[in-house]
Each structure stands twice: as C-alpha cells, then as structure tokens.
Image (cartoon, rainbow, N blue to C red):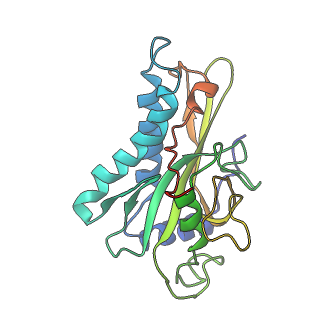
Amino acid sequence: MTQAPRSLDEQARLISALAQMGGLTETLLLDAARYGFDEAGDSTANDVKTLAGFLSWAKPLRFLRDRLGPQGWVPGRHPDLETVISPDRTFQVACATGNPATGTDRMPSTHLDKGPLAGLAIAGNQQLSFPRSVHPQFGNSPVAGMETWYLLQYVDLDEEGRGEIRVELSLPKHFTGSRPGVSRPKRGYINAWKPRLKLSPIQIGDEAEYRQDELEEEIDVRVEPRGG
C-alpha cells in the first residue's frame, strides 16, 4: 500500500521539521531502516527464530548512533528502552516495528508490547516548540524534559518478496499500559502518535529472502521493578 506522493509543500515541511531535530534527514532515517532490513535478510533458517526481528530492531539504532555520533548524539542505554539522544538532550529516538497501518493515513500501533520505561517516557512527551509554519501539529509549546520519538517501520512484502518498507518518525501519545492512579505503567502497546512524520516508502525487490513473521519477532527486554 504505497502512500500518495507528497506535494512540494509537504516535502518542504518534512525537510524543515527534521532539520530542526538535531539535523536529521529523511535519507538518513530511510538508510537506517534499510540497513536493518538488509542485516535481517542475511539470517537463515538455521539461525535462532528471533534473530531477524532482533536485527531489524537493533541495527537501525546502531546505524543512527554510528552516523549521528560525530554530530554530538549519544547512546541512551536504559534497561528496557535503547535510544540515541540528541545533542541538546531535549529528545531521543528509539526504534520499533509497527503494524500494517505504519506509514499510511491510519493510526499505527507497535507490533509488540513495550516495557514500563517506554510507558514512562511516553507519559512525559510534550510537543516540541516548532513553529506551525514547519508543521501544523507542532504548535508552540515549550520543551519540557526529554521527548521520546520512534522510528517506526513495517515491512510489507508479497509472496515473491516484492513490496515496500513503510517508515515514519513519530511522537507517541498513548500507551495502553498506563492506568489512572498507577505511578508505574505495565507493559503495553503504543497506539496513538502526534505528530507523525511519514517518510517515503522503501521499495523492495527480489532480494528479500525472509518472512514477515520472522521480522516481527522483535526483541524487547523485560525488566520487572524491584519489590514486586
């Protein structure tokens, strides 16, 4: 399901929005997603079942850390939330596999549930102070704490291995593991995002040699709080 081509105005807004996020570019983010896809594609039937999914999650993050490190970005190594942190420490980027709505006009969800730290990070998200001329959803609210954005991706292939990777850089707004009156969220899914910066889909040909169900076996470290 390829999204409609962006207008020149939409493209300019995307470029401007990313440029104000520590110098991110669409090319860099798409290269990170493609790198993870290619690394996962090197797995075989003799590898452990979850390897392809693990690589598709971990390798894009490694790619971003490698490329952005010289610009002052640093790794964020939380117990169940690995990220790369912007030079001004106002936001961080994590990676995740999304569901089929990723990159479309429908609202996506993460494919797998996430740990409590992801929920706490999402609870602290507030919109960045970009001008509305860059993107109407950004508003002008002040930065408060560190926001957590996700490079969300979904591989949509047919039986012959042709299709696309849909990618977006989006700010989570709802975590199903959060409950009123509960100070620490439980595991849950991220199922609402705003803003959503939908990137161009990556077209995939005959080089895909692994199944979507293998790719979706993403690894997520489970950490239980002390004291129950």
Residue furthest to the front in view is 227
The x and y percentages for residue 143 are 49, 84
The total of numbered circles placed on residues is: 0
The x and y percentages for residue 69 are 26, 58
Res. 71 image quadrant = bottom left
Res. 77 image quadrant = bottom left
| Residue occupying image coordinates x 37% and y 64% | 85
Position of residue 23 in the picture relative to residue 186 (left or right): left
| Residue 26 can be seen in this image | yes
| Residue occupying image coordinates x 60% and y 33% | 216
The x and y percentages for residue 29 are 45, 52
The x and y percentages for residue 188 are 67, 53
* Figure check: 225 above or below 136: above
Residue furthest to the top in view is 46
Res. 35 image quadrant = top left
| Residue 31 can be seen in this image | no
Position of residue 159 in the picture relative to residue 205 (left or right): right
| Residue occupying image coordinates x 69% and y 51% | 109
Quadrant of the snapshot with the N terminus = top right
Q: Which of 177 and 74 is in front in this view?
A: 177
Residue furthest to the left in view is 70
